[in-house]
């Protein structure tokens, strides 16, 4: 995209006026509230297994939203092998990574001037982490099946009167540790994966809905021409994420809406900081602080976060009800 030169961006009058102040209120106030919500509700704890023992979300509602290691790699149905989820995530990651590489090769680093590209890359990271966690999960699944087979065999031998070798104390302690303790790095990855999932969900709905309802029909800009890569950028991210959500067993606690707010707020602050030092045009016309309707546009985009996140939360809730 050929950025338009805006010589007045660095001027005092451009940044110090009532419009910029009001836009800053719309951006910074939700971010402050989001930080408070995260501080209050995010404890970072990760369970080894779901407490109520229910894979589909029913049962004890008190612990339905607990973050569980098994949830990042187990499908929503016990009958589905984790390998299917792994295969889908690997294919999705390769597709998103290839799309990013192609865009980067043709357009350079300026593609990260756009919120859509930020979100597209975030979803690629989600599928990359998901692929690694699914690999781990497949090994765990295989190990658990082997353990069950061994336990059944030992039980049959005991019933038939065969001698069953005893496990010494050290081996028992080691076995219990492997069953009950996961590494701190794994728990941190699971926690980060859950955050990226919910942050990507809202951002994908927001970017695609704004593009197809506002930018594409009404805004005639050079970088928004209809092409395969443009359609891919504003469609495949949400489609792949919805498919993964349909298959996975991840929860969707509403308080992590705060991370979505921080994600968008960080992009806006990045744009403001960039425009203070570099004389370039805005990536989206509704971000331009010089227009008289700027506070209205900023408020509307801020309010759009609610239905964007709500749509995905509703999708997850309906899926959980149908799979219960």
Image (cartoon, rainbow, N blue to C red):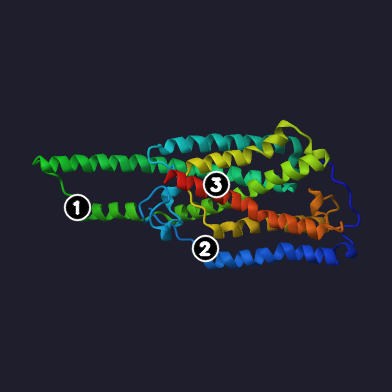
Between 11 and 22, the one lying in front of the other is 22
Image quadrant assignment for residue 37: bottom right
Q: Nearer the viewer, mark 1 or mark 2?
A: 2
Nearest to N terminus: mark 2 or mark 3? 2
Neighbor class of circle 2 (other Cα within 10 Å; few <14, some 14-19, many 20+) is few
User: Residue at label 1?
Assistant: 168
Residue drawn at x 73%, y 63% is 26
In the orientation shown, which residue stands out farthest toward the top? 228
Which label belongs to residue 267?
A: none
Left of 94 or right of it: where is 72? left
From where the camera sits, is residue 197 visible? no
Between 166 and 92, the one lying in front of the other is 92
In the image, residue 306 above or below residue 149:
below
Nearest to N terminus: mark 1 or mark 2? 2
Q: CA distance from mark 3 to mark 1?
A: 50 Å
Q: Secondary structure at mark 3?
A: helix
Residue drawn at x 63%, y 34% is 98
Q: CA distance from mark 2 to mark 3?
A: 23 Å
Residue drawn at x 82%, y 63% is 20
Neighbor class of circle 3 (other Cα within 10 Å; few <14, some 14-19, many 20+) is some
Q: Secondary structure at mark 1?
A: loop
Nearest to N terminus: mark 3 or mark 1? 1
Q: CA distance from mark 1 to mark 2?
A: 41 Å
Image quadrant assignment for residue 223: top right
Residue drawn at x 57%, y 42% is 241
User: Residue at label 2?
Assistant: 42
In the image, residue 107 above or below residue 11:
above
> Residue 104 appears at what percent x and percent y?
71, 38
User: Residue at label 3?
Assistant: 315
> Residue 237 appears at what percent x and percent y?
62, 40
């Amino acid at each position: 995209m050929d950025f338009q030169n805006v010589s007045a961006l660095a001027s005092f009058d451009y940044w110090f006026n009532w419009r910029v102040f009001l836009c800053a209120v719309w951006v910074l106030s939700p971010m402050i509230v989001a930080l408070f919500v995260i501080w209050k509700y995010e404890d970072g704890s990760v369970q080894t297994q779901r407490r109520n023992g229910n894979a589909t979300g029913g049962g004890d509602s008190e612990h339905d939203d607990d973050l569980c290691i098994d949830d990042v790699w187990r499908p929503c149905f016990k009958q589905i092998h984790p390998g299917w989820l792994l295969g889908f995530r690997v294919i999705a990651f390769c597709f998103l990574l290839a799309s990013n590489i192609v865009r980067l090769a043709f357009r350079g680093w300026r593609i990260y001037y756009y919120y859509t590209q930020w979100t597209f890359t975030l979803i690629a990271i989600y599928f990359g982490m998901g692929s690694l966690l699914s690999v781990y999960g497949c090994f765990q699944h295989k190990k658990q099946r082997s353990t069950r087979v061994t336990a059944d065999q030992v039980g049959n031998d005991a019933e038939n009167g065969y001698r069953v070798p005893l496990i010494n104390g050290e081996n028992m302690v080691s076995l219990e540790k492997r069953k009950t303790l996961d590494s701190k790095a794994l728990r941190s990855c699971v926690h980060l994966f859950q955050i990226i999932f919910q942050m990507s969900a809202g951002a994908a709905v927001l970017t695609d809905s704004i593009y197809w309802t506002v930018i594409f029909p009404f805004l005639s800009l050079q970088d928004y021409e209809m092409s395969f890569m443009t359609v891919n950028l504003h469609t495949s991210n949400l489609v792949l994420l919805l498919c993964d959500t349909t298959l996975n067993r991840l929860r969707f606690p509403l308080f992590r809406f705060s991370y979505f707010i921080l994600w968008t707020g960080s992009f806006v602050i990045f744009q403001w900081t960039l425009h203070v030092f570099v004389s370039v045009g805005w990536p989206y016309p509704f971000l331009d602080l010089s227009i008289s309707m700027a506070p209205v546009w900023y408020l509307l985009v801020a309010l759009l976060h609610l239905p964007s996140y709500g749509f995905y939360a509703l999708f997850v809730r309906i899926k959980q009800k149908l799979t219960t």
